[in-house]
Image (tube, grey):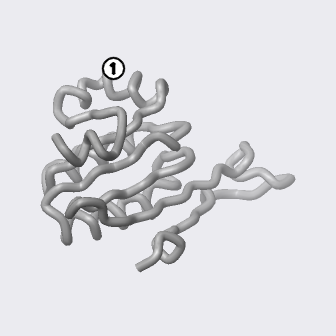
C-alpha cells in the first residue's frame, strides 16, 4: 500500500457556527501507516482529543494486529489530551509501542503523567524502531 493510500483525514465533530467547530476553528488530523525494517510505523499529525482520536486508534489497532513492534511518530502532533494518552496506554497493552519525535507539548504531557516511564520515547523513528 502506498503512503498516500494509507492517509486518513478527519475533522472535529460538533456544532458548526460561522465556520467553527465546537466554538473553535476545526483542527485537521492526518494519520499515515507504513512499514520500516519489519516495524509498523504510524505517523500522526494535528490535534488529538476525544473528537479526533478515532482515526489514530484505528491505525494503531491495525498496526498492532500486524506487527509485534509499532512506532508512533508524534513529531506532527500539536495537541494531545487524556484521550490520546489513554489510546497510547491501551495500545501499549496489545503491542510493543514506541514513540518517536515528540514535540515539546507532547513531551510535557508524557512527563507530567509519567507515561514517558512506561513507553520507549526516542527522537527519531529509526531510533525507536531499533530500541
Q: Residue at x 13, y 61 (%)?
A: 68
Secondary-structure class at tag 1: helix
Closer to us: 98 or 28: 98
Give the total number of marks visible in the rendering: 1
Position of residue 24 in the picture relative to residue 70 (left or right): right
Residue 128 sits above or below residue 32 on the image: above
Residue 78 sits above or below residue 27 on the image: above
Corner quadrant of residue 55: bottom left
Quadrant (top left/top right/bottom left/bottom right) for the C terminus: top left
Q: Residue at x 46, y 50 (%)?
A: 50
Quadrant (top left/top right/bottom left/bottom right) for the N terminus: bottom left
Closer to us: 110 or 23: 110
Residue 20 in percent (x, y) is at 77, 51
Residue 111 in percent (x, y) is at 31, 21
Position of residue 60 in the picture relative to residue 105 (left or right): left
Closer to us: 4 or 95: 4
Position of residue 13 in the picture relative to residue 73 (left or right): right
Position of residue 41 in the picture relative to residue 114 (left or right): right
Name the outermost residue toward the right. Answer: 18
Q: Residue at x 47, y 70 (%)?
A: 3
Callout 1: few (<14), some (14-19), or many (20+) C-alpha neighbours within 10 Å?
few
Q: What residue is shown with label 1?
A: 112
Q: Residue at x 39, y 26 (%)?
A: 107
Amino acid at each position: 500500500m502506498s503512503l498516500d493510500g494509507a492517509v486518513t483525514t478527519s475533522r472535529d465533530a460538533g456544532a458548526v457556527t460561522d465556520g467553527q467547530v465546537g466554538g473553535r476553528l476545526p483542527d485537521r488530523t492526518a494519520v499515515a501507516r507504513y512499514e520500516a525494517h519489519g516495524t509498523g510505523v504510524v505517523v500522526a499529525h494535528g490535534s488529538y482529543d476525544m473528537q479526533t482520536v478515532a482515526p489514530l486508534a484505528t491505525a494503531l489497532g491495525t498496526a498492532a494486529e500486524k506487527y509485534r513492534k509499532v512506532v508512533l511518530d508524534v513529531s506532527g502532533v500539536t495537541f494531545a489530551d487524556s484521550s490520546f494518552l489513554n489510546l497510547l496506554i491501551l495500545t501499549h497493552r496489545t503491542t510493543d509501542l514506541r514513540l518517536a519525535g515528540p514535540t515539546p507539548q507532547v513531551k510535557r504531557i508524557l512527563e507530567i503523567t509519567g507515561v514517558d516511564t512506561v513507553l520507549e520515547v526516542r527522537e527519531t523513528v529509526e531510533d525507536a524502531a531499533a530500541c
